[in-house]
Amino acid sequence: MKTKIAYVIPTLNLGGAEKQQVNILNGIDTSKYEVVLYVLKNKLQLLSQITNLDIKVEVCNIESIKDIKNFFLFIQKIKKFSPDIIHSQMYNANILVRLLKLFIPKAKIINHFHGMSAWLSKIKLYLDKSTFFLVDRFIVVSDRSYELRKTREAYPENKLFVFLNSVNLDLEIIDFKFNLNKPLVIGMASRLIPLKNIQAAIYMLSKLLVRGLDLTLLVAGDGPEKEFLTNYAKELGVESKVKFLGFVENMNSFYGKIDIYCISSKTEDLPLSVIEAMMSGKPIISSNVGGIPDILRDMPYTVLIDDFYEESEIELIYTMLKNCNGMKCSTYLNSIAYKKFANTEYCNKLDDLYKNILGKSDEKNCNSY
């Protein structure tokens, strides 16, 4: 008999947690697991990227806490499915599935965290601390997050596991020589929100153009800051060099169009886009935040930046790009990514965790990934 797993996530819109959920669904062994994905809200941008035809998707239409009827319909559906494991992603879903333990006591609960949750209020932290006893395992995506959850939320170490994000990109890597004397494209994949600090990347672009580099910035993603960012590019006189692509479904194609990847966020945990860019063989310019330094520090063809508005930091970026000139970067970065972040290995480790939580194996293979 197959083990039943219910995945619960707030949305399937573009985002790191959502893309990681898709990677899990595409990599899970459905000969061993019967899987249903419950999407709480009717936001489904990434639905078409689920290629595993054995996955069932239920859209719950719970747009707010006022949707009492749909909330109870969701409980009825998941009780009928009667999962052995309920694996949730992100804060709202994590809290919700803890309550499901009261309705489905046999189910093992896994909470999966993405981001450092700097927005966490005292009330939400209290709610978390008063209910985490209902959780059987906690998954975080970086060592930084592991240490934070041990101290701030006080999760027990024997239930806390690090699973670095994974990628499943089937890309043809062409190991060309990086040529700084030709037009180059910097790419970003991000929601257009203040936390992602895309304004800083536009500023960086303006300063690199002054240094004589021929660069264009492509931004994949959408959000409330689009008008502000468009106007900011105009203020700096670089509007012709900044292109907003909106939601991009085919990220393989996007990474194929760029030469350099940039992430300028104010805070991050371990963003999936950085791993995807590395898998695509692209040199990386990144904020020195969260779990990113753990994978990029001392890595060739990458640079970590504390402040994109500091002239000395712009010079570090310029130096990194000059050091890439004439080099073959792609195969090296791609090989590192495959060793550390392959989705097949990730799903094998997740399989070990599922077996352990059901008492079918020991924990030696799933302590960290």
Image (tube, rainbow, N blue to C red):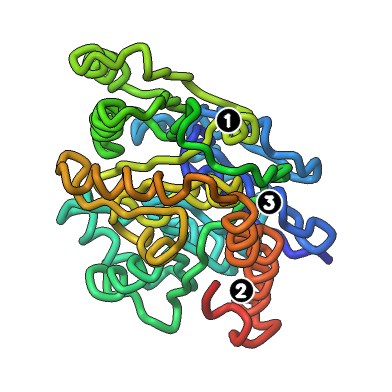
Element type where label 2 sits in the image: helix
- Few, some or many C-alpha atoms within 10 Å of disc 3 (few <14, some 14-19, many ≥20)? some
Q: What residue is at 30 percent from the left and 38 percent from the top?
A: 196
| x, y percent for residue 199 | 25, 29
Residue at 42%, 56% in the rendered image: 270
Q: Residues within 10 Å of mark 2 (few under 14, many from 20)?
A: many
Callout in the foreground (3, 1): 1
Q: Quick check: 362 above or below 136? A: below
User: Dot 2 corresponds to which residue?
Assistant: 353
Residue 359 % position (x, y): 65, 82
Residue 20 placement (x, y as % from top left): 56, 49
Q: Amino acid at mark 2?
A: Leu
Q: Which residue is mark 3?
A: 81
Amino acid bearing label 3: Phe
Q: Mark 3: which secondary structure?
A: helix
Which mark sits nearer the N-terminus, 1 or 2? 1
Distance between the Cα atoms at labels 3 and 1?
Answer: 38 Å
Relative depth, front residue between 145 and 108? 145
Task: Please name the residue that numbered disc 1 is placed on.
Answer: 254
Name the side, left or right, on which 146 lies relative to 248. Answer: left
Image quarter where the N terminus lies is bottom right
